[in-house]
Image (cartoon, coloured by chain):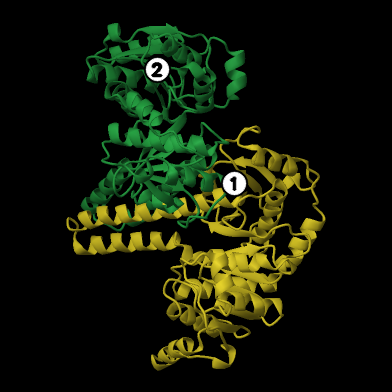
Chain colours: A green, B yellow
Amino acid sequence: MRIALDAMGGDFAPGPIVAGAVQAVNDMPELIVLLVGQEERIIAELSRLEESGVTIHRDRLPIVHASEVVGMEDKPVEALRSKRDNSISKTWGLMATGKADAVVSAGNTGAMVASGLFNAKMFLPGVRRPGIAAIFPSNQGPVVLIDVGANMAPKPEDLYQYGLMGAVYAEKILGVTDPKIGLLNVGSEDDKGNDLVRSTRDLFMNGPNSAKFYGNVEGRDVYDGHARVIVSDGFTGNILLKGGEGAVEFLFSALRETMTRMMVELPPESAAKVAEGVKQLKRRYEYKEFGGAPLLGIRGACIICHGSSDDRAIRNALRVAANIGLSGVNDEITKMLASSVAEA
Amino acid sequence: MRIALDAMGGDFAPGPIVAGAVQAVNDMPELIVLLVGQEERIIAELSRLEESGVTIHRDRLPIVHASEVVGMEDKPVEALRSKRDNSISKTWGLMATGKADAVVSAGNTGAMVASGLFNAKMFLPGVRRPGIAAIFPSNQGPVVLIDVGANMAPKPEDLYQYGLMGAVYAEKILGVTDPKIGLLNVGSEDDKGNDLVRSTRDLFMNGPNSAKFYGNVEGRDVYDGHARVIVSDGFTGNILLKGGEGAVEFLFSALRETMTRMMVELPPESAAKVAEGVKQLKRRYEYKEFGGAPLLGIRGACIICHGSSDDRAIRNALRVAANIGLSGVNDEITKMLASSVAEA
């Protein structure tokens, strides 16, 4: 398994990116991570880690030099055009030429997606448009929300495919038995919403996989987990994802404030226990545990990580990328789409 | 000030609805609440409260009989058509004929909005389409998100008006000084998003109120409060609102679980303090405190409450409805729209 990692992508790159790669390679004896980016800076990070006593398998951490970096705030398409020798395009190039089985980046999401969608030969057979799947926590376990930003103006047929691809991912990678597909909407009744969701609903209801269709789900139902796959246009999905992150951050900061005020009134031992409880809770809801968002529908695998990813997040993303390759998700998606051509 | 209250609307109606009206009338000596619904059931609730010792100003709580009830799960337009003598249509009828200055309901939101939009004579001069404004908490204080469900397929001009109406509401009712208007989008860069948001952005940038425009805001920025008014199509706004509610509920249930596990290890006095802290925190983020969502752009006032509203939520909603009437919000909206005609 060979994964091309954008070593320059992320708010704190290349430090935590390189560190995450080193950890992943130490965890998985079959894994080779191609570190794509500015050679000198990557070497400096590797040396720094080595000096601090970390074991580094340099033979499984080859460096692929890319002189330019797409910034987190760069306009994606412009940046890809003007910075020809950038690390994002190079990771995709490595996958397109068979030198890597997967790509991972915590860099500019727009550039990562644009670079992947640019070459339609990288799409799996039958796929109309790849979609980004984000993983949410729920009362029943992880939930797949697809799309969260690859496709701002999808057709009903795109959303239909997202549901099927998401279901394969939930089953094969997240271990969900018979995942149901929900359609993100403003109410549970059939006729709710806009034209896009009504037409998409018809495709699911009348298609060969209608048994997998749960029906409409509302924004709050994401967290109950009755539908383990939730289909959305990329605009709304992105807003829901980031809105959820914002709500969680906001609440934790309020919780911290409340707790800090309360702590002074508690005996030290009690205060320590409360602090530990809150810390555990926070860890449960951090995006880091989910290891990034896969772009589904492409040959190979692509994991898009949060810009603020630390070494743990990168290590998890590399593990997920390897799993996609090993689990046969893509064969399953191809089969599923071929047998599920929907009549509009 | 006369407010027509849908006594039959809400998951637990008419009990908490009538109780909230009684409290509001006790709070505000000028207030008259018309209790609209099944007379016998309303009288029974009033008698029950009276027997338990609550002071009831029956002279300021007249009952307006409506024999039928729109159920929470009824299809709005169908229900309004088939149940002619329903309490929702009757509250709107009272406002249309000048017998009430405002309407309040915790019932079927779709029916409440459809009933209001049905009669365009109820729109304020210059208003294209009324929009529902939800109030979010943020680090800077309350934030207005408009629209959250009245308009599923708005035009850019509708969104532009929502921003201006929301700004008047934030200033006059929430007491925000010079509120900035943000446009809900998937990124901060100018060209992000779909056609709708790009055209809306142009209207704000080139309109006479460009100084009020903050720019694009993402899902997570709702909670930072830099823009105190956030404009969205009704579909996405609804998903963001309910997604936020879901995230908060989900997190509080996890918090409760963590705390319960921890409590047994704490001395009783510490455990009581922790429980009190969590309770206080929860209260801060409950929708009840915000008193429902106003439908902006109509003559008079309309407050749409959460289906699970209790007496406190209804009392707050009645207070907000009275404030809208007293504060001159509608005159200000009319002036603002007249002076802000945008050239597309």
Residue in view at x 40 percent, y 52 percent: A221
As drawn, A302 above or below A293: above
Residue in view at x 77 percent, y 62 percent: B334
Snapshot quadrant of residue A36? top left
Report crowding for label 1: few under 14, some 14 to 19, many 20 or more residues within 10 A (C-alpha). some
Mark 2 = which residue?
A5
| Left or right of residue A310: residue A232 | right
The disc at residue A200 is none
Kind of residue sitting beneath label 2: Leu
Marked residue chain, label 2? A
Tell me whether marks 2 and 1 sit on the same chain: no
Snapshot quadrant of residue A64? top left
Residue in view at x 39 percent, y 60 percent: B282
In depth, the one of B164 and A179 nearer the eye is A179
Callout 1 secondary element: loop
As drawn, A267 above or below A103: below
Kind of residue sitting beneath label 1: His
Instruction: Pinpoint residue B231: horizontal percent, then vertical percent.
Output: 63, 49
| Left or right of residue B328: residue B182 | left
The disc at residue B226 is 1
Q: Is residue B224 visible?
A: no
Instruction: Pinpoint residue B262: horizontal percent, then vertical percent.
Output: 21, 54
